[in-house]
Image (cartoon, grey):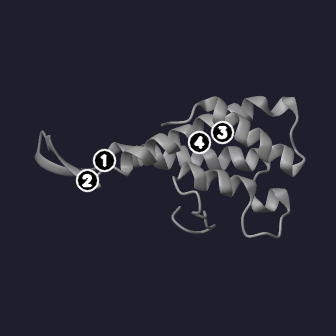
Amino acid sequence: MQESIEYYENKVRKCLEHAGRYTPALDLNIFLLAGALQSVALAYSEISTLTATTETVETSRGKAIRTLPVFKIAREAEENCRKQMKELGLTAEGTRTTSETTPMAELLAAVAGGKGRKVRPGKGG
């Protein structure tokens, strides 16, 4: 079951409240981040069903191999998440934490589909 944008909005709002940064003026940024998180979740869900990363397509010059579009969608959604997280101060630096994970990293791990799975900075992106 895919979560709604409202679900992600509530999670992001809780992260901001936890960090002491929430104000109603941030609602647009929260909505944008929630939409990006939902896009990441949808893309990851589709990627998890794939058996290949490329496809063969017919072009005017013959056959060509291209990366499946869902990978581009996932990459763009991840980048949008990073930008909005930075805007909202939901990075390790922004929350000035000394722990290994931030509330946002835990949220992204949940989006990635593993309850016990950690999102590690500097890995895969």
**Among numbered discs 3 and 1, the one appearing first in the sequence:** 3
Q: CA distance from mark 3 to mark 4?
A: 6 Å
Disc marking residue 24: none
Q: Earlier in the sequence, mark 2 or mark 1?
A: 2
Few, some or many C-alpha atoms within 10 Å of disc 1 (few <14, some 14-19, many ≥20)? some
Q: Which mark is residue 33?
A: 3
Q: Is residue 90 left or right of residue 22?
A: left
Which residue carries the number 1 mark?
Answer: 68
Q: Is residue 60 above or below residue 18?
A: above
Circle 2 residues within 10 Å: few <14, some 14–19, many ≥20: few
Looking at the image, is mark 1 or mark 4 nearer the viewer? 4
Determine whether label 3 and label 4 are within 8 Å by CB.
yes
Asked if the residue under mark 4 is in contact with the one under mark 1, i.e. CB atoms within 8 Å, the reply is no
**Residue located beneath label 2 in the image:** 54
Alpha-carbon span between mark 2 and mark 3: 29 Å
x and y, in percent, of residue 56 in the image = 17, 49
Q: Secondary structure at mark 1?
A: loop
